[in-house]
Amino acid sequence: MVKIINRSNILTEKINPKSEMIDTMSTEEIIRLINEEDGTVHLTVRKAIPEITKAVDFVVEAFKNGGHLRYFGAGTSGRLGVLDASEIPPTFSASPEMVQGMIAGGWKALRKAVEGAEDYPENGKEDCKAINLQPNDVVMGIATGGTTPYVHGALKYAKSIGCKTVFFTCTPKEGLGVEEDVDVFLEVLVGPELITGSTRMKAGTATKMVLNMITTTAMIKMGKVYGNYMIDHQAINSKLVDRAERGLYRCLRDCPMMTPIKRCWQPINMSKMRS
Amino acid sequence: MVKIINRSNILTEKINPKSEMIDTMSTEEIIRLINEEDGTVHLTVRKAIPEITKAVDFVVEAFKNGGHLRYFGAGTSGRLGVLDASEIPPTFSASPEMVQGMIAGGWKALRKAVEGAEDYPENGKEDCKAINLQPNDVVMGIATGGTTPYVHGALKYAKSIGCKTVFFTCTPKEGLGVEEDVDVFLEVLVGPELITGSTRMKAGTATKMVLNMITTTAMIKMGKVYGNYMIDHQAINSKLVDRAERGLYRCLRDCPMMTPIKRCWQPINMSKMRS
């Protein structure tokens, strides 16, 4: 049987005094309050920039050595990992293998909560083996509330085979009650949620911001961006065909060999060329 | 064949002058710049509070009349809709039918981009029929770049059968080149992304914030929150069993019938009771 831990002292489970009467507020008042709290998230992320930088450095090193980035999470944390990973192939034309998100309970948990899936550390270990985790991979565990056994199981196994490990949490290390031996302890203390324990709110936004930072920055460092243009994205729909054309034009514009013909090139309306 | 529209004038496709040299910056400089831009998102969301309020009012009215909330999106927008929807049953013990996210290309698009899936408005209409859309439902189309044919196809069909419609976009109505006849036009103008056109970044964060606001506020209005406690969530894992116990204790504490026994109740350590 799974042990029920008293988590009342965990920061993300604490009561936010601003919302003790939220059930009596008007719709607009509630939305204003949520917006006010959302406005604090980037400030707490800012404090973690040194650790985010360390995480990116490990990821870039792994990519350069044929390694991968693997996210592990449950519930919202797991879904945000899968979300971030799924955007990498179309945005940067990277192999889907390069960044992969694992979620407790498997793919069906993307749409529907899977009962008890996160409670077993061995599930995390099993998922590491299922994706054939290698020592040159980086494993990033995501557990905003800090304790998710699935995530700790994955991190422990990853460490044991020599992977670099990153642990993302919105709970301070002190009092977490979980022994951590990770290379980067990335804490973003967004504080108590307006709905007690609803870490899909501020903690989820912090998670999204940090994951986006890690993959975007790593891909820039891997040469997937020229100026601020994606130069290696997949043109798999109408929007992306248009964007690719403009990116190509932008690169050509900067090329010294294009100088002699620039004067006649620039006024061309590319959309007219296509119709 | 699908028509390629020149989208260079669309706000989310414009070049952000702050990042024109992003490919030459250090890892830490890039992360600081992303964080700075992320810090503007909640301010642009704030400007849309009147429209978000209108959207919530429609959703609450629908819920009270047995209707549902249906998100429609492609790529990141679609995934964020599915993400928000998937969190409602465990958080508020609502039926999975109540809030549902549809994504162009179907469930496989949650993990992997599906080529061309978003280019056909008829796919949006077909998905409306597949979920048996009813006139008392609210359809919220999400298209940060504004043009996604899949989303417009769904909105048009929804409107035609009498649904209330909400359109979320990060592109101004003017110059969008798409005729809109929706009940709520919810624009959040986050401006050009640091990586040109990469709307998974600021636009995605704005989307997440707005969807979370809509469902959280609607659920509060439906009586699913007491004080700031979730009082109707599913205790399907260790973390949630613990949270449910604390919520119950909190509610009992406020009950006048508990007053006589409060003095002996309060010092009880619930975690000890369980071991």
Image (cartoon, coloured by chain):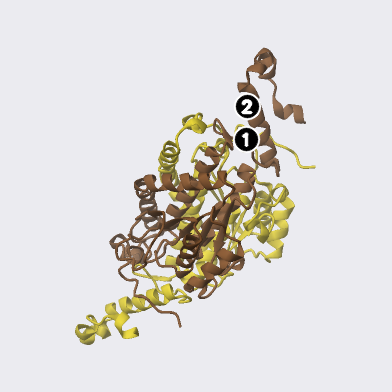
Chain colours: A brown, B yellow
Residue under the image location 45 percent in, 62 percent down: B216
Chain label for disc 2: A
Q: Amino acid at mark 1?
A: Ile
Which quarter shows the N terminus of chain B?
Answer: top right
Percent coordinates x, y for residue A40 in the rendering: 35, 50
Residue A43 left/right relative to B86? left
Q: Rounded to the nearest whole Å, what is the CA distance between mark 2 and mark 1?
A: 9 Å
Nearer the N terminus, badge 2 or badge 1? 1
Percent coordinates x, y for residue B50 in the rendering: 44, 50
- Identify which residue, B71 or A84, lies in the foreground: A84
Q: Residue reaching furthest right?
A: B1
Query: Is any atom of residue B187 visible in this view?
Result: no
Percent coordinates x, y for residue A111 in the rendering: 58, 65
Q: Amino acid at mark 2?
A: Cys
In the picture shown, does residue A234 fall above or below B231?
A: above
Q: Are marks 2 and 1 on the same chain?
A: yes
Q: Residue reaching furthest left?
A: B263
In the picture shown, does residue A31 fall above or below B194?
A: below
Which quarter shows the C terminus of chain B?
Answer: bottom left
- Identify which residue, B266 or A187, lies in the foreground: A187
Disc 1 secondary structure class: loop
Chain label for disc 1: A
Residue under the image location 42 percent in, 71 percent down: B223
- Identify which residue, B116 or B214, lies in the foreground: B116
Residue under the image location 49 percent in, 44 percent down: B202
Marks 2,1: beta carbons within 8 A: yes
Q: Quadrant of residue B107?
A: bottom right
Residue under the image location 70 percent in, 38 percent down: A241
Q: Residues within 10 Å of mark 2 (few under 14, many from 20)?
A: some
Residue under pointer 2: A251
Residue under pointer 1: A231
